Image (cartoon, rainbow, N blue to C red):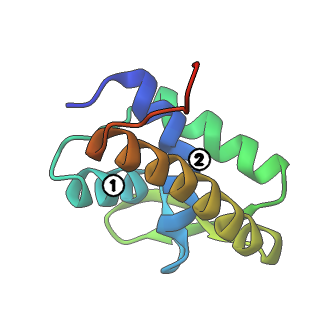
Amino acid sequence: MLPKTLTTAALRPMVLATLVNGEAYGYQLSQRIEWISGGAIEWNAGTLYPVLHRLETERLIESVWRSSDAGPRRKYYRLTTKGRKAVETEKAQWMTVHDVLVRLWQSDVSFGAGT
């Protein structure tokens, strides 16, 4: 398992990226991420739902309650148009972080003479 601080920082872009492929309810979101990460990332409800609420407040996602054959009603989340744009922004930011880390780990980075 990864440290909670790292997975919490990545929660927002991971939720948005997961919803690109269609709507999902909270437990589904956490299960998809856990499966994709090979079990390295797990979120509990206390971590996931405040982020979902914040994303709704920012109008990046919207939700609808639906009946379930398997039990109580579920709240399904989906991206808004604004949310789809946010996915691209988040992706660019995280790819920049990724690229910098890769460069740092793969080479002897020197900052020039005198530094």
| Helix, strand or loop under label 2 | helix
Q: Secondary structure at mark 1?
A: helix
Give the farthest residue toward the left: 38
Residue 60 picture quarter: bottom right
Q: Which residue is pictured at 36% across the width and 71% down the height? A: 69
Question: Relative to 43, is 20 on the left or the right?
Answer: right
* Residue 104 coordinates in the image, percent (x, y): 38, 39
Q: Are marks 2 and 1 in contact (CB under 8 Å)?
A: no
Percent position of residue 51, x then y: 63, 40
Among the 4 quarters of the image, the one containing residue 54: top right
In the shown orientation, is residue 57 left or right of residue 102?
Answer: right
Give amino acid for label 2: Arg
Residue that carries the numbered disc 2 in the rendered image: 12
| Residue 89 on image: x %, y % | 71, 63
Disc assigned to residue 88: none
Front-most of 91 and 69?
91
